[in-house]
């Protein structure tokens, strides 16, 4: 049994690679920002894009500490700043919530199979616009 598993491993890895490459190429071709967002017109984020992709959660956690414990809210790593820059606006200038599966945060987190729970409490569009809080957090409903 162990010998069969050892022999099957290279085949399984090759199949996974064949399935993953087209998805990775599509992600690279599509880009890492959503058209119609302010970020789409910028050369880079507050840090180079590769660094933001790898470390954005560390920046967000550090910002949480600075905001909650020190009261500092206006920094380049604020979640509101991310939403302000990366949210897409439709033709009527209505923001599309950033956590929808086809939007900036939602698409990347879906691709990486990572839970996106920031917007259970935080606004997913700038300035408390439409759909700013998840449906489960709306007035009159029980909070988890």
Image (cartoon, rainbow, N blue to C red):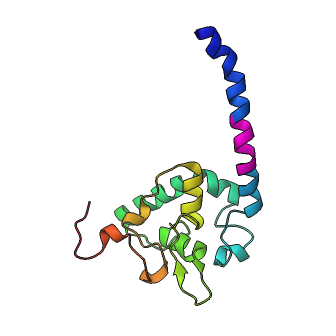
Residue drawn at x 22%, y 75% as measured from the top left: 140
Asked if 142 appears above or below 52 in the picture, the reply is below
Q: Magenta region, mostly helix, strand or loop?
A: helix
Q: Quadrant of residue 76?
A: bottom right
* 76 and 14: which is toward the camera: 14
- Does the segment drawn in magenta span residue 143? no
How many circles with numbers are drawn on the protein?
A: 0
Q: Report which quarter residue 90 is drawn in.
A: bottom right
Residue 142 placement: quadrant: bottom left
Residue at the image point whose x is 59% and y is 75% from the top: 85
Q: Is residue 132 left or right of residue 23?
A: left
> In this orientation, which residue lies closer to the viewer: 13 or 126?
13
Residue 80 in percent (x, y) is at 48, 73
Q: Residue at x 54, y 86 (%)?
A: 94
Which residue is found at the position 40% from the left and 58% from the top?
Answer: 65
At which x and y percent is residue 67?
40, 66
Against 62, residue 137 (above or below) is: below
**Residue bounds of the magenta highlight:** 16-23
- Viewer-nearest residue: 17 or 45: 17
Above/below status of 133 relative to 115: below
Q: Is residue 38 left or right of residue 133?
A: right
Q: In what quadrant of the picture does the N terminus appear?
A: top right
Q: Position of residue 95 (x, y in %)?
A: 53, 81
Asked if residue 18 lies in the magenta stretch, the reply is yes
Residue 117 rendering spot, x and y as whole percentages: 42, 58
The C terminus sits in image quarter: bottom left
């Amino acid at each position: 049994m162990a010998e069969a598993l050892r022999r099957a491993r290279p085949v399984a890895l090759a199949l996974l690679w064949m399935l993953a490459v087209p998805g990775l190429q599509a992600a690279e071709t599509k880009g890492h920002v959503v058209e119609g967002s302010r970020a789409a017109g910028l050369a880079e984020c507050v840090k180079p894009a590769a660094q933001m992709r790898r470390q954005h959660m560390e920046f967000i956690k550090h910002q949480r500490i600075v905001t909650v414990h020190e009261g500092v809210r206006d920094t380049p790593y604020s979640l509101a700043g991310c939403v302000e820059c990366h949210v897409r606006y439709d033709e009527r200038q209505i923001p599309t919530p950033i956590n929808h599966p086809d939007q900036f945060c939602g698409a990347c987190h879906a691709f990486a199979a990572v839970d996106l729970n920031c917007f259970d409490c935080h606004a997913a569009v700038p300035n408390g616009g439409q759909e700013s809080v998840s449906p489960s957090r709306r007035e009159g409903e029980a909070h988890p």
